[in-house]
Image: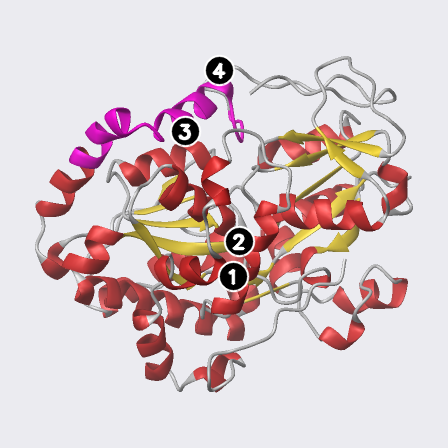
């Protein structure tokens, strides 16, 4: 990927070229991801993954989690930390923390990890762009992201002529940001370093979530849209403020989902069921134990799953200040009665269908030809397998426990 410029009033944005850097998407990462779209190049990864999978039969296969240190990974980490996989009769290895989406996808395809959380739009790229057979078996959470900007930015229109960071091209963040920009008459662009940015343009750059707060503090960007707890971290540090919550644009949307290789779903259905059941129980426990969850995931927790302090995670998970955002007007849809982040595992077909339509209308870097052939209804049935999550939800009291309609259907609400 080429370097992207900052706006005329912002400092140059560093885009790392080293694979050793703690970046969201390095040039080498982009090359690795692009290479996976070629069948000849992908074959060794597929063979390695098959060999690892075949080494275990049924439930003997250990759970090998891959995750990024964001709140989207909460169900996977809670299930591990509370021994829920073991209670389902499974063995679980220590979760592996990755620094970029490219790295986690590569490890997943190679079979080095077998249970990952992944950005929902990225699953489209993996299955239909890279042609790696995998299935969404559950949502990890709902909402849990925000557009955070410099303190002097008062409204979305103020982002004209400036640079905003996203975590990945195939992300709900990119989709929702562009929706919000279009409503204000702004266009998303990707400019080369040093190129001028028009007053009605917003320059998009891909940046690692872990780098976003410092980039905002240094004013190399005017804002970022990303998963928590980086929005909360910017607020606590006093370097940024939330301008919009993602769930206030697309009501109760999914960001990350649980992704399993199709070979494991097809050949080890009982294993897949046990994994999904553990994750559903983890979400239910999290809903009732939000402060305990913050402690468990924090750098003060016994396992130190993430580098975030408990108070930052608590600001997201407990959301004690959400009412203040409603009073201030940051939250525009008070009747939606949402939390900053919440947990509901069922993957609605209506959401997947709308996601396909939305990504087709979104500016995305790279080869997007595969998107043209995607039919929303087909994808909803082909990409997602709801058998395991339905059974798991029934085992904990039924859909009403998570506020899900008995018929597992809903109408998508989007209001940028």
Residue found at x 56% / y 76%: 410
- The secondary element bearing badge 1 is classed as helix
Residue in the foreground of this view, choosing between 309 and 207: 207
User: Which comes before the other along the chain, label 1 or label 3?
Assistant: 3
Residue at numbered disc 3: 33
Distance CA(mark 1)–CA(mark 3): 25 Å
The correct choice, above or below, for 135 with respect to 36 in the image is below
Asked if labels 4 and 3 touch by Cβ distance under 8 angstroms, the answer is no
Is residue 300 something that shows in the picture? no
Residue in the foreground of this view, choosing between 16 and 203: 203
The correct choice, above or below, for 406 with respect to 77 in the image is below
User: Which comes before the other along the chain, label 3 or label 2?
Assistant: 3
Alpha-carbon neighbours of circle 1 within 10 Å: few (<14), some, or many (≥20)? some
Q: Which residues are magenta?
A: 22-47
**Quadrant for the N terminus in the image:** top right
Residue at numbered disc 4: 18
Asked if labels 2 and 3 touch by Cβ distance under 8 angstroms, the answer is no
Alpha-carbon neighbours of circle 4 within 10 Å: few (<14), some, or many (≥20)? few
Residue found at x 29% / y 38%: 109
Is residue 214 something that shows in the picture? yes
Asked if labels 1 and 2 touch by Cβ distance under 8 angstroms, the answer is yes
Q: Which mark is residue 248?
A: none
For the residues carrying marks 3 and 2, which lies nearer the camera in this image? 2
For the residues carrying marks 4 and 1, which lies nearer the camera in this image? 1
Residue at numbered disc 2: 356
Distance CA(mark 3)–CA(mark 4): 15 Å
User: Which comes before the other along the chain, label 3 or label 4?
Assistant: 4
Left or right position of 85 against 186: left
Distance CA(mark 3)–CA(mark 2): 20 Å
Residue at numbered disc 1: 353
Alpha-carbon neighbours of circle 2 within 10 Å: few (<14), some, or many (≥20)? many
Residue found at x 38% / y 38%: 105
């Amino acid at each position: 990927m080429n370097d992207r410029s900052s706006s005329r009033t912002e400092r140059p944005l560093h885009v790392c070229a080293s694979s050793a850097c703690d970046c969201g998407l390095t040039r080498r990462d982009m090359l690795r991801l692009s290479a996976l779209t070629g069948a000849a190049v992908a074959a060794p990864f597929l063979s390695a993954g098959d060999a690892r999978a075949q080494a275990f039969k049924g439930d003997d296969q250990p759970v090998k989690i891959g995750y990024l240190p964001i709140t989207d990974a909460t169900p996977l980490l809670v299930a591990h930390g509370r021994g829920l996989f073991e209670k389902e009769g499974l063995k679980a290895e220590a979760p592996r923390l990755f620094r970029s989406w490219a790295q986690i996808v590569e490890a997943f395809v190679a079979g080095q990890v077998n249970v990952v959380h992944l950005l929902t739009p990225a699953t489209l790229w993996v299955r239909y762009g890279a042609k790696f057979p995998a299935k969404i078996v559950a949502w990890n959470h709902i909402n849990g992201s925000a557009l955070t900007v410099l303190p002097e930015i008062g409204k979305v229109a103020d982002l004209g002529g400036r640079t905003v960071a996203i975590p990945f091209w195939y992300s709900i963040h990119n989709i929702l940001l562009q929706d919000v920009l279009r409503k204000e008459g702004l266009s998303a662009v990707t400019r080369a370093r040093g190129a001028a940015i028009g007053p009605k343009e917003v320059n998009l750059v891909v940046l690692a979530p872990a780098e976003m707060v410092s980039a905002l503090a240094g004013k190399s960007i005017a804002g970022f849209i990303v998963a928590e707890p980086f929005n909360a971290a910017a607020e606590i540090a006093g370097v940024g403020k939330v301008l919009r919550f993602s769930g206030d644009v697309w009501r109760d949307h999914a960001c990350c989902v649980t992704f399993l290789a199709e070979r494991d779903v097809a050949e080890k259905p009982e294993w897949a069921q046990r994994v999904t059941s553990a994750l559903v129980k983890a979400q239910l426990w999290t809903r009732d134990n939000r402060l305990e969850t913050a402690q468990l995931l924090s750098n003060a927790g016994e396992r130190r799953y993430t580098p975030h302090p408990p108070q930052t995670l608590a600001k997201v998970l407990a959301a004690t200040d959400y009412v203040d955002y409603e009073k201030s007007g940051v939250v525009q849809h008070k009747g939606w009665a949402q939390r900053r982040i919440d947990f509901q595992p069922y993957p609605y077909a209506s959401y997947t269908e709308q996601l396909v339509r939305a990504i087709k209308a979104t500016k995305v870097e790279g080869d997007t030809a595969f998107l043209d052939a995607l039919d929303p209804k087909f994808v909803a049935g082909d990409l997602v397998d709801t058998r395991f999550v339905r059974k798991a939800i029934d085992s904990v009291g039924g859909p009403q426990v998570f506020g899900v309609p008995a018929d597992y259907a809903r109408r998508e609400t989007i209001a940028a």
